[in-house]
Amino acid sequence: MSGATSGANAVLAALRASPGSALSGELLSDQLGVSRAQVWKHVESLRKRGYGIEGEPGGGYRLQSVPDRLYPEEILPELETHWLGRHYEHLETTDSTNRLAFELGRSGAPHGATVVAEGQSAGRGRLGRSFYSPPYTNLYVSIVLRPSCSIADAPTLILGAAVAVADTVAAFLGDREAVSIKWPNDVLVRGRKTSGILMESSTEGARIAFAVLGIGVNLNVDREQFPDDFRALATSLASELGRPVDRAAFARALFHALERELDAHAAGGFDSIRPRFEGYFQMADSRIAVDELADQRIKGRARGIAANGALEIEVESGARSGEIVQVLAGDVTLAKPPRDGR
Amino acid sequence: MSGATSGANAVLAALRASPGSALSGELLSDQLGVSRAQVWKHVESLRKRGYGIEGEPGGGYRLQSVPDRLYPEEILPELETHWLGRHYEHLETTDSTNRLAFELGRSGAPHGATVVAEGQSAGRGRLGRSFYSPPYTNLYVSIVLRPSCSIADAPTLILGAAVAVADTVAAFLGDREAVSIKWPNDVLVRGRKTSGILMESSTEGARIAFAVLGIGVNLNVDREQFPDDFRALATSLASELGRPVDRAAFARALFHALERELDAHAAGGFDSIRPRFEGYFQMADSRIAVDELADQRIKGRARGIAANGALEIEVESGARSGEIVQVLAGDVTLAKPPRDGR
């Protein structure tokens, strides 16, 4: 962090600490040990970043509004994590936060290093699909992980991340019943997708050298803005709530929940996460069809999640009827589409 | 491939097909259906790429030498693979072929798409170490794979790649006994490292969406050029043979062996590779010490490779004496260093 940035952050922290009241330039100058001219320069740089700072002649400075940005100064001061997000990079826009975080991982970034962008020009989702990433409305974050587990545990790390997203979405909605997880890693609100998770990793022997967990959550985007082809299937928190959510507060809460689930996974593997995952896994015993990537369509009843993170399906017809098969990946369709407002 | 390039390749192919004899510009012009001026332009472009083409007035063109480069025109015509290397990108230099291939994977490159660079400015090895990558002497290749296996099988894919490298190295040395594999993925010649393998992957559910297999093999680099800190531990084929190897021929042979091992893995998993792996696994029953990444040092006897690719060690002392433990990754040291010229 440059000296100028940390000086501006000190001014911001002082203004935040006195909500509603004005601080004189002289007081700030004394408190921070810098000249009044420097205080003024820091205030100007904060204003350029979108902070609304009132300055009356003789009346001092007062913080009136903060910008709707995921700046480090909006995230870090109230962040309650131990390691996740402590190394935090913010970008106005990028092609893909996962690509950037993977580069950070390659160059030795620590466990928990985090990249957030306000918008992505080439956000990626599962099955090579793009992830719709309009700017300044949602959360696009990628986190470098250095778990000490086997690469075989990567799928269950993703399930842990899905639990963290589901918990955070449920808390902001104030409606846990509305939230479910569609295997492997979509978080749904009332049956519509609100989040995507993607993991990339570098393997060393049988261990994960590092992984990048990429998470996109539809927060304040208006459903009407969605591309036609998935408007019916996707939603956002704002569309469900009828009002926007505080994106910075959501990011902090998500980082906290993620750290909790990843620490649980490190301590006890998927078994430590399973009860919470199953709480959101409303697919259990549903009739589903799975289109596996290169294979045939499997129809049957979802029975649960195997220890390796695979979906277990009891086949309903054909030669393998009654057999439990494990599906590693694929596109799941519920036989009966979820209803709105159940 | 541009028209100019494919025209030059057609001229090159015609010259190659007539070794030792000169082909007149008129004959080439007739044979390829282009003007004599175009033939001359193609010859000039080939000369610029390092092809030695003799042209006597009235005597026609004769191919006298080919450059020591891994150009597609040196690799593809004699390549015997079905899918590996068929999409082939060649670069004079890059930061890391793995980074480039991962970008290709992200943008949908097919199974087997291959990136080769003559040199790397930031070649990467295991444990975040750099991989010494001087230009025009060795082989640096990264291959995009779209295996249909679980992410849990990634470590055994690497073991299959190690078998392919070991087979190719053994064939070029003409000495199979001199070649061994040090778990997880170093190929040694007379106890000295000659190859490094690194895998990176993108995970989708429990399946590998795509992986990038990065392989570096020390071919013609002089051992004396190695940085001091690993001269004693590393070697090259040329240093072992006392003469340089044909890098393009090595690359083709390696691609062929890799395709064989990866096809075997796709058909029958690690069991299909295990016999060949064990033929090179001279660590079996050796006394070793393993420094696991974040953990303690384990000493004992190497007993074999588990189905998940982990190294099995029978612990020799302490509370766990006699127990078989699985090691996922780490730095292996043989208790007795291998002797030269055994």
Image (tube, coloured by chain):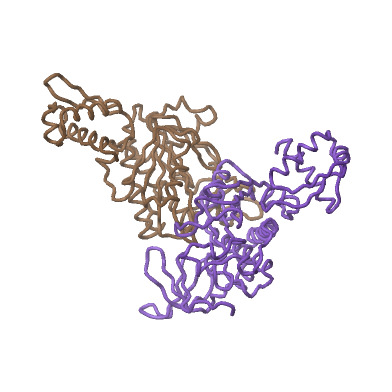
Chain colours: A brown, B purple
Of the 4 image quadrants, the one containing the N terminus of chain B is top right
Write the residue at 35% across / 40% down: A170
Camera sees residue B268: yes
Q: Is residue B111 left or right of residue A277?
A: right
In this view, B144 is above or below A10: below
Label count reads 0
Residue lying furthest front = B57
Percent from the top left, x then y, of residue B103? Answer: 54, 44
- Closest to the observer: A282 or B147? B147
- Closest to the observer: B249 or B335? B249
* Residue A119 location, quadrant: top left
Write the residue at 67% across / 46% down: B87
Of the 4 image quadrants, the one containing the C terminus of chain B is bottom right
In this view, A103 is above or below B332: above
Write the residue at 66% across / 59% down: B254
Q: In this view, does B301 lie to the left or right of A90?
A: right
* Residue A24 location, quadrant: top left
In this view, A154 is above or below A227: below
Camera sees residue A331: no
- Closest to the observer: B280 or B246? B246
In this view, A6 is above or below B164: above
Percent from the top left, x then y, of residue A287? Answer: 54, 45
Percent from the top left, x then y, of residue B338? Answer: 52, 77
Write the residue at 44% across / 45% down: A282
Q: Is residue A181 left or right of residue A319?
A: left
Residue lying furthest top = A57
